[in-house]
Image (cartoon, rainbow, N blue to C red):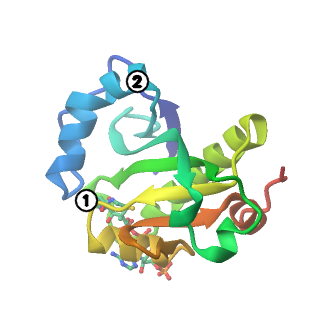
């Protein structure tokens, strides 16, 4: 199966997307377009031939209060740490469990690193929808914020190094 990433646009069938978390399906159908006007960017994972939507992620610029960050990340950083928020990430449920969620995460982080190289940024923050999502992020080197277990963080320099992307 050949897959590609494309920015959210009109004309895609969002109604048949189902990731096992109804809130994330609804968000894509009903709120993603509005969120774009508010400053969020949503990208779709498409089956190349059918153009079927099989996943998506949404990112936005973010400022993390330094006092919320683990000390190692906050040291030397400004009071508000420039960040990119990985606000949503979901894969169609019929594709779960074969490594594609990890691939989608890599695609999201690649877009994030490129954006931060151009515009600046020190960390990636993930909002995990539940404990399962938080565990998925921990499995991919994100660290829980000390006072907010559903919010996780990784330094952009660490991501760039892991993905062998240029930084800064
Ligand atoms: C979370 C989600 C994207 C994972 O996709 P997936 O294709 O099932 O996961 P993968 O098969 O790519 O798993 C990749 C790795 O993450 C691990 N992993 C997957 N889900 C995990 C979980 N809930 N907890 C811990 N590790 C997890 C896998 O064991 C695998 O590790 P390995 O490479 O060492 O074998 C998918 O289940 C999904 O869309 N869920 C609903 C939406 C959601 O919860 N989104 C939030 C994500 S932050």
Q: Residue at x 79, y 55 (%)?
A: 165
Q: Earlier in the sequence, mark 2 or mark 1?
A: 2
User: On screen, 17 above or below 104?
Assistant: above
Ligand 1 quadrant in view: bottom left
Q: Secondary structure at mark 1?
A: helix
Residue at x 41%, y 48% (from the top left corner):
87
Image height of 145 relative to 38, above or below: below
**Residue 138: image x %, image y %?**
47, 77
Q: Residues within 10 Å of mark 2 (few under 14, many from 20)?
A: few
Instruction: Check disc 1 and report the residue beneath it.
Output: 94
Disc 1 crowd rating (10 Å Cα; few below 14, some 14-19, many 20+) is few
The answer to whether residue 36 is left or right of residue 15 is right
Who is closer to the viewer here, 18 or 150? 150
In terms of depth relative to the viewer, which is nearer, 9 or 168? 168
Where's residue 16, x and y in %? 18, 38
Q: In this picture, is 154 found above or below 2?
A: below
Is residue 160 toward the left or the right of residue 53 in the image?
right
Q: Is residue 14 visible?
A: no
Does the closest atom of ligand 1 sit within 8 Å of the Cβ of label 2?
A: no
Extreme residue in the left direction: 22
- What numbered label is drawn on residue 38? 2
**Circle 2: element type:** helix
Pinpoint residue 83: horizontal percent, then vertical percent.
60, 49
Q: Is residue 159 shown to the viewer in this render?
A: yes
Residue drawn at x 84%, y 53% as measured from the top left: 166
Q: CA distance from mark 2 to mark 1?
A: 31 Å
**Front of the two marks 2 and 1:** 2
- Residue 116 at x, y percent in the picture: 70, 43
């Amino acid at each position: 199966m050949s897959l590609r990433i494309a920015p959210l646009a009109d004309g895609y069938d969002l109604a048949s997307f189902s990731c096992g978390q109804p809130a994330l399906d609804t968000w894509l159908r009903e709120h993603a377009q509005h969120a774009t006007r508010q400053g969020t960017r949503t990208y779709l994972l498409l089956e190349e031939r059918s153009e079927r939507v099989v996943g998506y992620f949404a990112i936005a610029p973010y400022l993390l209060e330094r006092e919320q960050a683990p000390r190692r990340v906050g040291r030397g950083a400004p009071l508000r740490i420039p960040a990119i928020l990985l606000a949503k990430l979901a894969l169609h449920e019929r594709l779960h469990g074969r490594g594609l969620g990890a691939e989608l995460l890599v695609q999201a982080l690649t877009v994030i690193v490129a954006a931060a190289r151009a515009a600046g940024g020190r960390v990636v923050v993930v909002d995990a929808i539940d404990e399962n999502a938080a565990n998925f992020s921990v499995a991919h080197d994100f660290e829980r914020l000390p006072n907010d277990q559903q919010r996780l963080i990784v330094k952009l320099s660490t991501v760039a190094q892991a993905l062998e992307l240029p930084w800064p």
